[in-house]
Amino acid sequence: MILKMNRVKILFIAVLMLPALVYGEMKGVDGVITMTTRTSIVRVGLNGSGTATIDWGDGSKKETVKIASVVYNEHHYSGTRPRTITITGGNITDLYCQDDQLTALDVSRNTSLAKLICNDNQLTVLDISRNTALTELNCSSNRLTTLDVSQNMALIILWCSKNQLTALDASQNTALTRLRCSGNRLTELNVSHSAALKYLDCSYTQLAELDVSRNTALTELWCDHTLLTTLDVSQNTALECLECSYTRLTELDVSRNTALTKLWCDYTRLSALDVSNNTVLESLWCTNNQFTADALNNLFDTLHDNVITYEGKKGIKGIFILDNPGSADCDSSIVTAKGWKLVEKGIRAKKISNYGEKNQ
């Protein structure tokens, strides 16, 4: 009787331990991805090769999917209690799990991952230290307080805006060409070794300093709504678009930025500006600054009189000077004589970046 009771007891313990044993074994399996969601409908996109098995975590039948190109797999849950999804097998190189109300995501065992799109979730932690093949990461609109990309040296595109980051060190990401880290609590940003960087958006942060002197390939810089008091763009000779509005700048030298086509420097503390070397400039915003009438006339004198063409047609050159001390008394004839349109009143237009829409 005692022997029989012991056997029953051992069997009972084994059954209780089985999930933990399976989970422990699964943790050691390479290529496994797990994520926890609270939504009633989830969509997961996969790209790569081979086949993968998806366990939706609700007791439903596991799905086996072929991976040849981007394939989205949708699943409906009854209720919104937490479910853990497990994806195994296949050579998964791209993972799309954006807007799935994820509270946890583990990609540490999928070292072949090259593209991770997990924006618009509820993630507080994201470990990508083992994903050294990663070239593109979009983790924007989450709840991340830290992001370590020091091991992701192949990273080319990084979108991490609208989180709660206070610092971002991209010094190891020498291949980086596009970085959007706007809408964070950043007080530190290191892009000194990202020589290939073409696009940088660090707007709506708490940055008081920004060093882009080594980012000589930069064509777009968005550093508006920051605490910057100085900005040196003298080494950024390829710069085409500069947005530095809503800062504390008192001076701005764009004499070496001869490729500049768009310049936004409104709501700063500027009282003078010289654009005589910016001979392809087509849009200049300098509203709500400290320009007197004489200072505006001096600025007008430096405007080029070249004809701007867009898709073979004559383009419009516009300068916006609303709410400067000298806006009402400046000589607008200087502007019109050079083929520019002077806008004293108007609604601030939505700005478009070459890398996507830039919201105000």
Image (spheres, grey):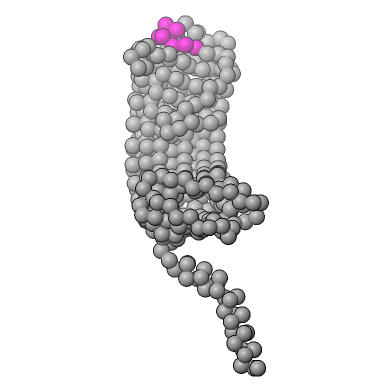
Q: Position of residue 313 (x, y in %)?
A: 36, 12
Q: Is residue 257 shown to the viewer in this render? A: yes
Q: Nearer the viewer, residue 51 or 343?
A: 51
Residue range in magenta is 336-342
Q: Nearer the viewer, residue 246 or 128?
A: 128
Q: Position of residue 4 (x, y in %)?
A: 62, 90
- For image coordinates 47% across by 45% down, the residue present is 72
Q: Quadrant of the N terminus?
A: bottom right
- Side of 352 where 102 appears, left or right: right
Q: Nearer the viewer, residue 7 or 275?
A: 7
Q: Is residue 337 magenta?
A: yes
Q: Quadrant of the C terminus?
A: top right
- For image coordinates 55% across by 22% down, the residue present is 348
- For image coordinates 52% across by 10% down, the residue present is 330
Where on the picture, by quarter, is residue 220? Answer: top left
- For image coordinates 58% across by 19% down, the residue present is 347
Q: Is residue 338 magenta?
A: yes
Q: Is residue 314 above or below residue 139?
A: above
Q: Position of residue 168 (x, y in %)?
A: 48, 49
Count how many numbered circles sit on residues in the image: 0
Q: Position of residue 35 (x, y in %)?
A: 53, 56
Q: Is residue 153 shown to the viewer in this render? A: no
Q: Is residue 149 above or below residue 299?
A: below
